[in-house]
Image (cartoon, rainbow, N blue to C red):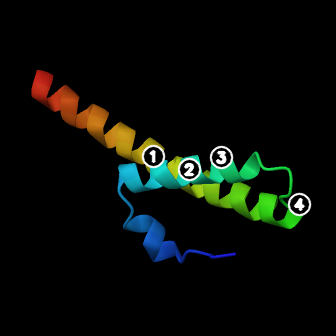
Amino acid sequence: MFRRKRKEYLNMTFEEALKRLNEISERMETPDITLKSAVELYSEANKLTEICGKSIEEARLELEKIEQ
């Protein structure tokens, strides 16, 4: 399984992270996934969720500045 390096996650855009999360979700739904793969994908999904959350928070703060 392809493992991303930490700096690759830091350089991901919201859209890239969301796309990868969708790919992981589809893979996790397949009946032939191994437990080891599922755990690795779950870990990756947690990192990606954090990236998306930070991006959303940054956008929210930017919108608040605009509204003031």
Q: Secondary structure at mark 1?
A: helix
Q: Earlier in the sequence, mark 3 or mark 4?
A: 3
The C terminus: image quadrant: top left
Q: Earlier in the sequence, mark 4 or mark 1?
A: 4
Q: Give the residue number, with chain letter if any, for mark 1.
A: 52
Which label lies toward us, 4 or 1?
A: 4
Q: Secondary structure at mark 4?
A: helix
In the image, what residue type sits under mark 4? Answer: Leu
The CA span between labels 2 and 1 is 10 Å
Mark 2–mark 1 CB contact (< 8 Å): yes
Viewer-side residue, 18 vs 68: 18
In the image, what residue type sits under mark 2? Answer: Leu
**Left or right: 42 in relation to 46:** right
The CA span between labels 4 and 1 is 25 Å
Residue shown at the point (37%, 38%) measured from the top left:
57
Residue shown at the point (86%, 57%) measured from the top left:
32
Q: Residue 67: name its quadrant.
A: top left
Viewer-side residue, 36 vs 29: 29
Mark 2–mark 3 CB contact (< 8 Å): yes
Q: Position of residue 26 (x, y in %)?
A: 66, 47
In the image, what residue type sits under mark 3? Answer: Ser
Mark 3–mark 4 CB contact (< 8 Å): no
Q: Position of residue 30 (x, y in %)?
A: 78, 50
The CA span between labels 2 and 3 is 6 Å
| Circle 4 crowding by C-alpha within 10 Å: few under 14, some 14–19, many from 20 | few
Q: Earlier in the sequence, mark 4 or mark 2?
A: 2
Q: Earlier in the sequence, mark 1 or mark 3?
A: 3
Q: Give the residue number, with chain letter if any, for mark 3.
A: 25
